[in-house]
Image (spheres, rainbow, N blue to C red):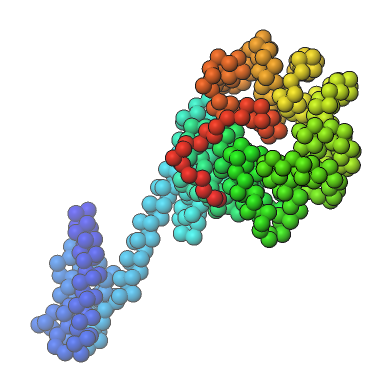
Amino acid sequence: MIGWLADFFRFVWALLYWNTRKSWFQLGGRRGRSPCQNPSDSGRAFETQCEACLQWDRPARFARVCPLLVATPQGLRCSVDTPRVRPFWGRVLRYVGGSLLGLYLIGAIGIFVFLRTIGYPISIFHVTWPGLWYRVPQARSAYFFEQGNKAFAAGHVRQGLLYFENAYKFDPGNYLAGLALARNYQTTQPIISDAVYRRLYREHPGQRAATAQDWFRALLARGDFTQVAFLAAHELVTNSLHASPWMRALIFATRQTHDDQTLQTLLAGTDIHVKPWHTLLETELLLRADKTTAARVNLLRPWPLNSPPYALYYQVENLLASGENYPAFDQLGRSVGHLDDETVLALRLAAYARAGLKSQLAFEFNTLLSRPLTPPAIKILSAHLIRYPDPALFQLFYAKFERAALPLTTENAGSHFSVLCVAGVHQDRARLEDQIRRLKSLAAVSFLRLNLVADFFNNESAALRIATFLPILPVPLEVTYALLERYPGPSSRPATAAPRTP
């Protein structure tokens, strides 16, 4: 064994040393004696001994370095004359290449076994083939993302966030990991959340509309109206398919920030996406400038029925806000078929409430409550009762909701939290506490901030703003709007963090 090991190290050294000596011999014109032949021999083929192999434990092994060494009856001899002695660099490359390949495969297999033992979903080809190396960080990202979901399901929020951070760090192309990280940071680390949303918005153009919607909901719930206005104005001119929701967001946000400049800039511009909104923008700016007579003229004249849906909604809503109830009814009647059924029903309920038509309002409510209670119906009724509290109608609504006994699933969570907020708006402490207890018992984890909700609605903490806890309530967008309209407050964004465009 010792002799074999000694010859192995001699072999490694000889590959480089003797081939280099032979190369110099060739470059020198093959003059004089060969560097590897015995200088006392004739230098002729099959007569000359090999001096390079004399120190080996088994000299015949030197043939792996130089195939010119052959066995003869007289012993090992060089098979060529001195002038024909030459190096064998091809052998060097094969041995070195083969050794490196072997070491590479051993290392790759070791890494594969290690990663598979951890649980990373990779194959042997992802580790061994360089063209697939990019799949390794993707697999690690997928693994951490899955672990993050499991951690959140078990109520381990901090651990889940750490997993999501690692998932997004290993693969910034993992859109779902980035989205999960941004969503879960929106309450505790809003600046980091916005940075992740901004990166997702920029680097995933195919998901840009979905990212913008998700980011908008986070900003709106936090009361960050300045950034909502920036995002809405940007999306308005780049996402014509969803222009109506973005115009509504823009109008709402700029009302909160008292910013008319964004609307004036859009109205003065020439972008074709803004042209359908000119009448709405003109009317809104007139209302903000207290030019109510000119605004009233705009609102009372029929707007084209091919206007964007939010323009028709805006006209009816502002006619109602201006006390023009019956013109609002007329315009709403004209808009039927051009607005979706939920919007028409919500506007009709609002019109009855503003006009004081209690019997018609009660009839609409009872008609809706006579059917099976669904999340869309709960959303409409909750948003209405937040905007227009009515204890009698709330009693009917809550009784129907209790009888429905909706399970607390992802689909129904918004309904449960909406009813919670409606109870709070109506200062019904018994039902508010009952709903909080029910949510805590049905949920897999404890909602630690639900006590803040109770304190807010019970006026036990005047310093609380609704944006303090609204991000943790998975209520529908319409209910979020209704709550922010009822409880307007300062933005929750840190004053030192300037808004940025996407």
Q: Quadrant of residue 410?
A: top right
Q: Estimate the x, y position of residue 61 in percent, counting from the top left.
A: 25, 67
Q: Nearer the viewer, residue 327 or 125?
A: 327
Q: Estimate the x, y position of residue 184 in percent, counting from the top left.
A: 53, 34
8 relative to 328 in the view: left or right: left
Q: Estimate the x, y position of residue 135 in percent, counting from the top left.
A: 51, 52
Query: In the image, is residue 399 above or below residue 346?
Result: above
Q: Residue furthest top?
A: 430
Q: Quadrant of residue 89?
A: bottom left
Query: In the image, is residue 160 above or below residue 339?
Result: above
Q: Residue at x 23, y 70 (%)?
A: 16
268 relative to 128 in the view: left or right: right
Q: Residue at x 85, y 50 (%)?
A: 304
Q: Nearer the viewer, residue 110 or 6?
A: 110
Q: Nearer the viewer, residue 427 or 208?
A: 427
Q: Estimate the x, y position of residue 162 in percent, counting from the top left.
A: 45, 35
Q: Residue at x 84, y 47 (%)?
A: 303
Q: Nearer the viewer, residue 98 or 61?
A: 98
Query: In the image, is residue 217 above or below residue 392?
Result: below
* Residue 466 showing in the rendered view: yes
275 relative to 462 in the view: left or right: right
Query: In the image, is residue 411 above or below residue 296?
Result: above
Q: Residue at x 67, y 9 (%)?
A: 430
Number of labelled discs? 0
* Residue 345 showing in the rendered view: no
32 relative to 250 in the view: left or right: left
